[in-house]
Image (tube, rainbow, N blue to C red):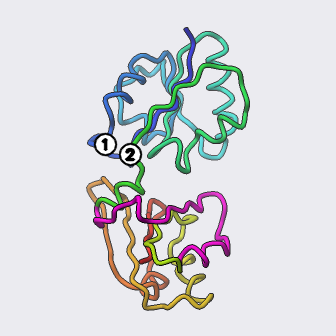
Amino acid sequence: MSKLYIVGIGPGSKDYLTLASKKAVESSDVVIGSRRALDLFKIPDHGKIELNAQNMKEDMKLAVSEVKNGKIVALLSTGDPGFSGILKPILKMKEDINIEVIPGVSSVQLCAAKLKIPWDEADLVTMHGKGISEDILDIINNGKPTIMLPNFKPAELAAYLIENDIDQDRKAAICEKLSYKDEKIIETSLKDISEMEFGYMCVMVVY
């Protein structure tokens, strides 16, 4: 029976792949994902399609089309598909196909673990593809740690907060490239973060 697996692959390291994700990929006729995601699995070349970040909508349409043609398809999603992942855009397509979601370890969860934050006592915010919203100013002052996926540049977010009267000495942290060999965790102040450069694979926390 044809099916679309939406597979969470975790933050990037094979150590955080689940058995369920491996089984879903192994049982699929076609696997679609970024090169980084595809490299986590042993997939025959004829059965994999590299996802183009600049053309994701078309790649998602391709995944749905393959399912409608009777195939089992695995669509790989970094982290967990339900948090800043590809579950939402797939559901918005409103296609009548069989979908199964395989959850993964989100970088937000791993960040909370690394910093020893009970993440059910924190605010979780994603700015991926959205930019900075002024709503963050209310959230960040509610007494809880705020764990955020910035919109690419943590320095811009830190500068925005400072410009909007958030104390520049507020404790903050950056978790960069979580689960990779060059993982970096920095605990410092908002002011310091506003003056530093990081890659796009970051989670930011303001306490």
Residue at image coords 30%, 59%: 113
Amino acid type for the residue under numbered disc 2? Val
Find the magenta span and give its range.
Answer: 114-140
Distance (Cα) linking label 2 and label 1: 7 Å
Neighbour class for label 1 at 10 Å: few (<14), some, many (≥20)? some
25 vs 135, left or right, is left
Amino acid type for the residue under numbered disc 1? Tyr
Query: On the image, numbered disc 2 is attached to which residue?
Result: 105
Residue at image coords 46%, 78%: 143
Quadrant of the rendering where the C terminus is positioned: bottom left
Give the vertical position of 59 relative to 140 (above or below): above
Q: Which mark is residue 16?
A: 1
Quadrant of the rendering where the N terminus is positioned: top right
Q: Secondary structure at mark 2?
A: loop
The first of marks 2 and 1 along the sequence is 1
In which quarter of the view is residue 205 placed? Answer: bottom left
The reply to whether callout 2 and callout 1 are in contact (CB within 8 Å) is yes
Give the vertical position of 107 relative to 52 (above or below): below
Residue at image coords 65%, 35%: 90
Q: Position of residue 82 (x, y in %)?
A: 53, 43
Q: Which mark is residue 147?
A: none
In the rendered image, residue 131 lying in the magenta stretch gets the answer: yes
Q: Position of residue 24 (x, y in %)?
A: 42, 23
Q: How many marks?
A: 2
Q: Position of residue 5 (x, y in %)?
A: 51, 26
Neighbour class for label 2 at 10 Å: few (<14), some, many (≥20)? some
